[in-house]
Image (cartoon, helix red, strand yellow):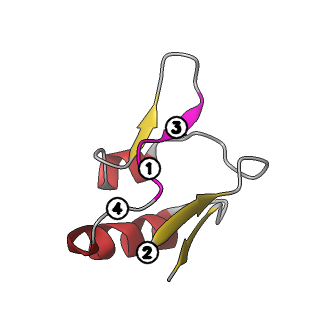
Amino acid sequence: MKIVVNYDLCESNAICMAVAPEVFEVRDDDFLYLLTEEPGEELREKMEESVRRCPKQAITIEG
């Protein structure tokens, strides 16, 4: 699976980071960083939760 973040929509509110800190990180500059674009299948449930909980619907899963 591939994780795609629409940075034009993203507010860097860190909800996704709270769900999956191994994939998402909001740094001191208040921007969201994707630590890996292709997390393993063992993280699919966390990725799906991140997509559901994103208030701006800025995260999508491909594949």
Q: Circle 1 sits in a helix, a strand or a loop, which is it?
A: helix
Question: Which kind of residue does numbered mark 2 sit on?
Answer: Met
The residue where tag 1 is placed is: 15
Check contact, mark 4 vs mark 2: CB within 8 A: yes
Question: Which kind of residue does numbered mark 4 sit on?
Answer: Pro
Q: On the rendered structure, is 2 left or right of 43?
A: right
Provide the residue span drawn in magenta: 31-37
Q: Earlier in the sequence, mark 2 or mark 1?
A: 2
Q: On the rendered structure, is 6 left or right of 25?
A: right
Estimate the spatial distance between the alpha carbons at disc 2 and disc 3, rounded to whole Å: 17 Å
Q: Does the magenta portion include 34?
A: yes
Quarter of the picture containing the N terminus is bottom left
Check contact, mark 1 vs mark 3: CB within 8 A: no
For label 4, count other residues whose C-alpha is less than 10 Å away and answer few (under 14), some (14-19) or many (20+). Answer: some
The residue where tag 3 is placed is: 33
Count of numbered badges drawn on the protein: 4
Q: Circle 3 sits in a helix, a strand or a loop, which is it?
A: strand
Question: Which kind of residue does numbered mark 3 sit on?
Answer: Tyr
Q: Earlier in the sequence, mark 4 or mark 1?
A: 1
The residue where tag 4 is placed is: 39
Residue 26 vertical placement versus 42 (above, below): above
**Residue at far bottom of view:** 63
Q: Nearer the viewer, residue 26 or 37?
A: 37
Residue at image x 65%, y 60%?
58
**Residue 1, disc:** 2
Q: Does the magenta portion include 56?
A: no
Estimate the spatial distance between the alpha carbons at disc 4 and disc 1, rounded to whole Å: 18 Å
The label nearer to you, 4 versus 1, is 4
